[in-house]
Amino acid sequence: MVIDVPATEQPDFGEGRLYFVGNATTVIHYGGFSILTDPAFLHAGDHVHLGHGAYARREVEPACQISELPPLDLVVLSHHHGDHFDDVAARELDKSLPIVTNEHAVGLLHEQGFTQSYALDTWESQEVTKGDSRLRVTSMPGKHAPDHVAGLLPPVMGSMLDFYDGDDHRFRLYISGDTLLHDRLYDIPRWYPDIDLALIHAGGTTLLGTVVTMTGEQAVRCVEIIEPRTAVPIHYNDFSVFQSGLDDVKQAAEASSVDTEFHYVSHGDEYRFRPSS
């Protein structure tokens, strides 16, 4: 099933914008589409429940609230967890907004009243159209935790966003999701080479004594595997369970020989990007 979004303006394929709200929450504008990722809008000092008696305190205020967002076409959600789809998102987002995610999240979203949620298995795609603009969202392999604690955390997916002007491919954007390093990451550049921009989740999230998202060093290793033209680290300092901040990413990037250009964003920053040709 294709998601058809009404076209309201002439799409711009010459330049895109990434607005960093905080944590893994961004707003991506490209090719006429406005896409919200992993919506988390709790205020600094608030707590989220991460399951099995674990809580995390938000340490940094998000750059905006849902009422301040521009009109949105869809949400791309890596997984349904307290720091990626929080109570504010559940309460304030439009219940008819299309959400592309995994099967586990779709079930929870349905319980919360969301009526247009689309589940993807790994390597499956969802087509979205808006006039002559097309977007293909493909689920990428992700692994949220080591095998011995995998059942304690919700399943996660990465996402590949391919933007088209009619039949012409214009831009490829990868979002890692809350993954650790794992062997299936090597399949991504085999099947999806020439990635223009990658949003890499770092932070070294530590729950019950176990690291469940990439540290700064591991995030750079992920970039070395994926080899995007540009990488933007996100998800690095918002919650009390993060143990590896942006400085760790910067230090590892400086020591890396990968050709990728790293661009660093703080809350409220807007990063403008262009296709390679």
Image (cartoon, rainbow, N blue to C red):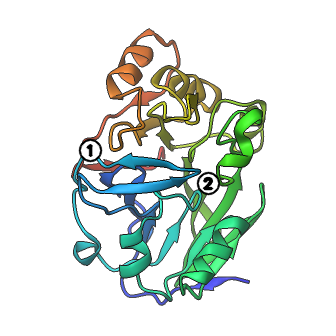
Q: Which residue is at the front of the view, 161 or 67?
A: 67
Which image quadrant for residue 47? bottom left
Q: Position of residue 73 (x, y in %)?
A: 45, 78
Q: Which residue is mark 1?
A: 59
Q: Residue at x 56, y 34 (%)?
A: 208
- The disc placed on residue 159 is 2
Classify mark 2: helix, strand or loop: strand
Which image quadrant for residue 109? bottom right
Q: Residue at x 60, y 76 (%)?
A: 128
Query: Which of the two discs, 1 and 2, labels the residue nearer the N terminus?
Result: 1
- The 10 Å Cα crowd at callout 1, few under 14, some 14 to 19, many 20 or more, is some
Cα distance in 3D space between marks 1 and 2: 26 Å
Q: Position of residue 177 (x, y in %)?
A: 56, 47
Q: Residue furthest top?
A: 255
Q: Is residue 89 visible?
A: yes
CB under 8 Å between discs 1 and 2: no
Q: Position of residue 16 (x, y in %)?
A: 37, 57
The quarter of the picture where the N terminus appears is bottom right
Residue 252 left/right relative to 167: left
- The disc placed on residue 237 is none
Q: Residue at x 22, y 73 (%)?
A: 68
Classify mark 1: helix, strand or loop: loop
Q: Which residue is at the front of the view, 2 or 183?
A: 183
Q: Position of residue 83 (x, y in %)?
A: 44, 54
Disc 1 marks which amino acid?
Glu
- The 10 Å Cα crowd at callout 2, few under 14, some 14 to 19, many 20 or more, is many
Disc 2 marks which amino acid?
Ser
